[in-house]
Image (cartoon, grey):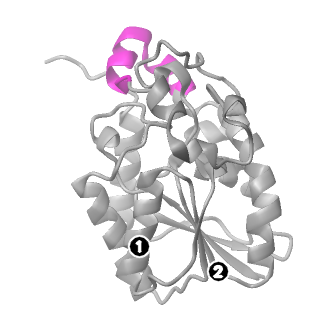
Amino acid sequence: MSKYKLFLLRHGEGAWNKENRFCSWVDQKLSEDGVKEAKDCGRLLKEQGYKFDLVFTSILSRSIQTAWLVLEAMGQEWVPVIKSWRLNERHYGSLIGLNRAEMALEHGDEKVKLWRRSYDITPPPINESHPYFLEIYNDRRYTTCDVPKENLPRAESLKEVLDRLLPYWDSTVVPEIRSGRTVLISAHGNSCRALLKHLEGISDEDIVSVTLPTGIPVLLELDENLRPVRPRQLLGDQAKIQAAIKKVEDQGKAKSST
């Protein structure tokens, strides 16, 4: 029997989602379509009667902006929003800024799928010669983390995302859920996938094919041990959701020249 409701949300489309580039820890705002996705998500949740007590986000703007727009559309702007780097997108290392489809053309679809979606394969790390290194590591937000800046990731597998996320989940998010609060986590494709893997017990092999489209809320109904009592629900028009999932999956495929 369901005791708790938890909502996961991958932020609305960002500028680099639109350009099909690895965005990762580069701070990008939502695209126009992403703003619409977040507002539509909030309207849907309001229509379905959901109310949040607390929202958790990463410290990346697209995650925070999505949360703000959702709450505004729901008329719940007053709900507290708590931010942590531990909910950040996966760190894609030296792949940051590169175009996924162009990489697939060069390295093959399967290699790019492994880099994007596998559980325990870490991409090559970012170094100081990378064009976005200073933009990331000189950003003042990373002086606010609970680890020294020099200990922050330089690249991550999905496993490493889960490793840095779980302590925060256990110490900060779980007590709020257990106290009866309805929580929304407005985060990123990979931080949400990592959490789904943990909660649903998804195998290392099967997590490769779990896809979350931007701006679509995921409802998890959990028992007293925080285990799902029924399959996750992606809320909204199911035909549109399936089309959005296909769009995400196609991002890592080489575009055939015509």
Q: Secondary structure at mark 2?
A: loop
| Region in magenta | 98-115
The quarter holding residue 58 reads: bottom right
Q: Residue at x 33, y 24 (%)?
A: 101
Mark 2–mark 1 distance (CA, rounded to whole Å): 15 Å
Residue ranking furthest to the right: 225
Mark 2, other Cα within 10 Å: few <14 / some 14–19 / many ≥20: some
The quarter holding residue 183 reads: bottom right
- SS assignment for the magenta stretch, majority: helix
Which badge, 2 or 1, is on the more N-terminal residue? 1
> Can you give x and y, in whole percent of width and height, for residue 252 in the image?
40, 29
Task: Please tell me whether residue 114 is drawn above or below residue 77 in the rendered image.
Answer: above
> Can you give x and y, in whole percent of width and height, for residue 42 in the image?
39, 76
Is 34 one of the magenta-colored residues? no
Is 113 one of the magenta-colored residues? yes
Q: Residue at x 60, y 18 (%)?
A: 125
The residue that mark 1 highlights is 70
Task: Please tell me whether residue 225 is drawn above or below residue 77 in the rendered image.
Answer: above
Could you tell me which quadrant the C terminus lies in?
top left
Q: In this orientation, does residue 210 appear?
A: no
Q: Secondary structure at mark 1?
A: helix
Q: Residue at x 73, y 56 (%)?
A: 200
Q: Amino acid at mark 2?
A: Thr
> Can you give x and y, in whole percent of width and height, for residue 111 in the image?
51, 17
The residue that mark 2 highlights is 182
Judge from the rendering whether residue 216 lies leftward or rightward of residue 189; answer left or right: left
